[in-house]
């Protein structure tokens, strides 16, 4: 029945047009900002330790205490989790567009405020930073369900997967931009202030007021792309699927999409009212009907995203330790603070350029040919294989073949992005009913962020060396990088198994997938049984 609505049929059958690309850019710039803001913190944590916690009587420069390191790196993830649940629910209650601008403004304000963090003591500055990064994360969280839902509801049936994946792929450019901005800022300061390494002159290696600007500039730059797209977000009309299927306003849906598609569309009030009265379009999230129709699907989308993000975020957040272990980043005392930022940024930019960004765009290219299920299964499989290939002969890689280690490590990133990191974002925006779509995507994404918190907090401690002499100050001995990689391999394998709960959505309309075009007993005549979803 919903499938018979002319406005939705027009969207499903529409050829790829300019408005599709506009929607990708508008939604994608939000994701660019999300990734920049979430991942740039790992570029400056070492610098924060040097600036605020260095004791020049010690042989090594300062590092953030473990509890503060955990808070600084993880607090935005906690905010993101809360934002995904709240704004996901709000997007279904108030509409996608009304909430969309709010999340963006929150990101702009909190990006700037993070860079202006203040305090009379080091711990005071860190507390202020954590406060603003929590609310930054809260805004970022809203962007996940809203961007995915808006793009899925605007897209045509044939290339919907590629369009949603393209929005998510902007995350790769955000990670890359974080590294590039850090490289530019650190290089600029290095040219201006010729500073010795900590080993050569402890006091002179810390030009405190100057170095304090570096991390602030890097964090504040995240506001720029978000602010640039605010006007265009506010100009986007509400999606026709929300207006027709949730707000029950067929006239407005037809008028809005007539402008977008440049065609004349009729208002279908009678069909929309029939749809509103259908029993199978009135069940709620906590009903037995939802559990019967979509319960296993929601279990599939939440568990796979949870397991994927444990691996993905732990990799991103302790990769600087891996770079140190294989010699890409020298011991801290052999560098000054600026050189350390530069080295970490350079290493992360190379990984992003060579594996992260290409992986995202491989998904965009192939998702509507291979399907979501095949790409997710393949991604989890190869992530498992490469994790074990890194972990089991870890000592060989570390001693005899450091470049080989980095290549293999890059492949795990490539197949997470040409794999579950993209598909876990795409599928929840397609398979649930319009009135619950944003909420269910928010729940799935929040499960992912719960996994990210496990990865960020858990592996920060777990990846510590088993040898007490090699442990970072303030940490206890951990299980080491080798055993951490083995654990991540097991987690990826579990993700592969749970993928079998997720349905294939390639080539079907959103209403066909969600069951909203099925007739129930109160509305169907002699047309017979409809196909269950």
Image: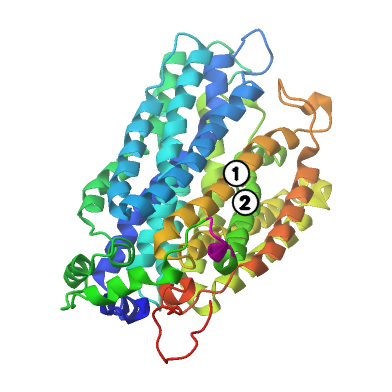
Q: In which quarter of the image is residue 289?
A: bottom right
Residue sitting nearer the eye, 449 or 68: 449
Tell which circle, 2 or 1, labels the residue nearer the N-terminal end: 2
Task: Please say if 483 is above or below 284.
Answer: above
Q: Quadrant of residue 273?
A: bottom left
Task: Please say if 515 is above or below 202.
Answer: below
Q: In which quarter of the image is residue 61?
A: top right
Task: Find out whether residue 373 is within the magenta segment.
Answer: no
Q: Residue 432 has which mark? A: none
Looking at the rendered structure, the number of numbered marks drawn on it comes to 2
Residue sitting nearer the eye, 414 or 336: 414
The boundaries of the magenta stretch are 286-291
Task: Find out whether residue 289 is within the magenta segment.
Answer: yes
Residue 412 in the image: state x and y as whole percent. 65, 57
Name the residue at 62% across, 64% down.
296
Question: Which is the main secondary structure of the residues drawn in magenta?
Answer: helix
Where's the N terminus, which quadrant? bottom left
């Amino acid at each position: 029945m919903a499938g018979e609505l002319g406005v939705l049929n027009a969207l499903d059958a529409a050829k790829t047009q300019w408005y599709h690309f506009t929607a990708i850019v508008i939604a994608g710039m939000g994701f660019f900002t999300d990734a920049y803001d979430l991942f740039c913190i790992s570029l400056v944590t070492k610098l924060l330790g040097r600036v605020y916690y260095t004791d020049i009587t010690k042989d090594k420069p300062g590092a953030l205490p473990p509890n503060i390191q955990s808070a600084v790196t993880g607090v935005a993830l906690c905010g993101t989790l809360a934002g995904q649940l709240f704004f996901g629910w709000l997007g279904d209650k108030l509409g996608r567009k009304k909430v969309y601008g709010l999340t963006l403004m929150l990101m702009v304000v909190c990006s700037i405020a993070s860079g202006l963090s203040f305090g009379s003591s080091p711990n005071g500055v860190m507390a202020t930073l954590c406060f603003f990064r929590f609310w930054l994360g809260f805004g970022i969280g809203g962007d996940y369900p809203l961007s995915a839902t808006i793009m899925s509801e605007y897209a045509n049936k044939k290339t919907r997967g590629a369009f949603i994946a393209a929005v998510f792929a902007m995350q790769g450019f955000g990670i890359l931009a974080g590294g590039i901005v850090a490289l530019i800022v650190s290089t600029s300061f290095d040219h201006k202030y010729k500073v010795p390494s900590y080993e050569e002159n402890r006091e002179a290696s810390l030009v405190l007021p100057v170095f304090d600007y570096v991390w602030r500039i890097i964090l504040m730059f995240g506001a720029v792309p978000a602010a640039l797209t605010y006007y265009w977000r506010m100009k986007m009309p509400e999606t026709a699927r929300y207006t027709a299927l949730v707000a029950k306003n067929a006239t407005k849906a037809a008028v809005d999409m007539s402008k977008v598609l440049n065609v004349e569309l009729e208002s279908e009030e009678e069909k929309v009212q029939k749809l509103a009265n259908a029993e199978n379009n009135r069940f709620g999230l906590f009903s037995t009907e939802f559990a019967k129709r979509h319960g296993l699907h929601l279990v599939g989308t939440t568990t796979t995203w949870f397991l994927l993000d444990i691996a993905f975020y732990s990799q991103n957040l302790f990769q600087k330790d891996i770079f140190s272990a294989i010699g890409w980043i020298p011991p801290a005392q052999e560098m000054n603070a600026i050189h350390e930022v530069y080295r970490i940024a350079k290493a992360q930019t190379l990984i992003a350029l060579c594996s992260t960004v290409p992986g995202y765009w491989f998904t965009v290219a192939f998702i509507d040919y291979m399907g979501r299920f095949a790409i997710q299964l393949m991604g989890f499989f190869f992530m498992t294989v490469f994790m074990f290939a890194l972990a089991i002969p870890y000592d060989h890689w570390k001693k005899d073949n450091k470049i080989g280690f980095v290549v293999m490590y890059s492949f795990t990133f490539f197949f997470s992005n040409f794999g579950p990191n993209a598909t876990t974002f795409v599928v929840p925006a397609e398979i649930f009913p319009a009135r619950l779509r944003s909420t269910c995507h928010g729940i799935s994404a929040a499960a992912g962020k719960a996994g990210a918190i496990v990865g960020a907090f858990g592996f920060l401690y777990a990846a510590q060396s088993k040898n007490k002499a090699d442990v970072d100050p303030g940490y206890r001995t951990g299980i080491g990088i080798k055993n951490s990689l083995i654990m991540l391999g097991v987690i990826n394998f579990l993700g592969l198994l749970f993928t079998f709960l997720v349905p294939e959505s390639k080539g079907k309309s959103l209403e066909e997938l969600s069951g909203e075009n099925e007739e129930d007993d109160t509305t169907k005549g002699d047309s017979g049984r409809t196909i269950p979803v």
